[in-house]
Image (cartoon, helix red, strand yellow):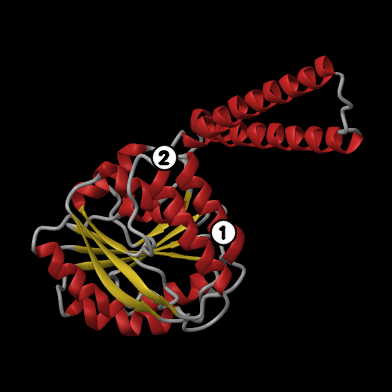
Amino acid sequence: MQLSIVVPVYKEEKNIPEFLRRLRPVLTGITDDYEIIFALDPSPDHTEAVILAERESDDRIKLLAFSRRFGQPMATLAGMSYSRGEAVIVIDVDLQDPPELITEMVAKFREGYEVVLPQRRQRTGEPWIKRAVASVGYRVINKIANVQIPPNTGDFRLMSRRVVTELLRLKETHGFLRGMVAVVGFRQCLIPFDRPARFAGETNYNRFFGSLRIGFNGIFCFSTYALQLSTMLGFFIAGFSFLLMTIYLFYKFMGWEILWGNPTLVILISFLGGIQLISVGILGEYIGRIYEEVRGRPRYIVDRAVGFDPQT
């Protein structure tokens, strides 16, 4: 079988040699017909030089270098679009995604599964705040979104050629791979594993805001629930205002003294202002994503493609 490994990289010069040392024996134990595609955002370190040096001894290593930094999601999609394997595996180079798990993933693929998802039992080396955001995010997304995303799964996964073809047809600009794979569907299975810490270096991923951005993509790109929630809050506040007006009128007709003064007005005005800003923000999130889609800009621009056939 033909097997493609897609590896998005940025400032990972220290991890690449060890990654390849562990990956190659796994791949040769499965098939000799494989390719390792490094999708490189331009890095200030020697990541590109390290990849090209490794390619000198193994021409199955290939390089996609982009014209500027487009981010990991777009780099992943670019690597998938250049791949040719019957099965495509997306994996990080920092060895938090164990290459040894690929053998079991391919075995599941041969059993007939179109998507094989490693699911994290433990997340060694990750701060509690990232684990908390991830846990809450998956629960919220699966509660309100139009698709179901298995919790504690990342971009590390095996996909059949049919799944990759359908993914590339989606043409969505956010690149939220987990949600896109859920949209495509097909037969899927999970493989539990314990995720180790990074092999070397610091993560290029903002642990809190990065997780938050992924969560927002899951909510706003795959559900309109936030708009519905904003509408429901509007009706609730309108009903509350009508009730408050009724109470004021009752006090007035009864001749009773109204005890609520300026503090009540300040609280109500602040509350209503906050709700209005939240509603405008939710609307802005959707409009921003519509703007990204209708602009129609290319999701990535390849500067150099090393090791690929001219037709590719």
Q: Is residue 190 above or below residue 222?
A: below
In the image, 224 versus 77, the foreground residue is 224
Gap between marks 1 and 2 measured at Cα: 18 Å
In the image, 66 versus 275, the foreground residue is 275
Q: How many numbered marks are there?
A: 2
In the image, 55 versus 264, the foreground residue is 264
Amino acid type, residue under disc 2 in the picture: Phe
Amino acid type, residue under disc 1 in the picture: Gly
Q: Which residue is labeled 2 in the image?
A: 222
Q: Position of residue 130 (x, y in %)?
A: 54, 67
Q: Position of residue 155 (x, y in %)?
A: 38, 60
In the image, 33 versus 263, the foreground residue is 263
Closer to viewer: mark 1 or mark 2: 2
Query: Image point 50% across, 53% down: which residue?
Result: 214
Q: Is residue 69 left or right of residue 224?
A: right
| Image quarter hosting the N terminus | bottom left
Q: Is residue 276 above or below residue 140?
A: above
Query: Image point 20% across, 69% down: which residue?
Result: 105
Q: Position of residue 289 (x, y in %)?
A: 53, 35
Query: Image point 14% across, 66% down: which residue?
Result: 108
Q: Position of residue 59 (x, y in %)?
A: 29, 71
Q: Is residue 156 above or below residue 96?
A: above
Q: Decide which of tag 1 and tag 2 comes sooner along the chain.
A: 1
Query: Image point 22% across, 68% down: which residue?
Result: 34
Instruction: Say if residue 203 shows up in the picture.
Output: no
Residue that lies at the very extreme toward the left in this rendered image: 111
Q: Which residue is labeled 1 in the image?
A: 210
Q: Residues within 10 Å of mark 2 (few under 14, many from 20)?
A: some
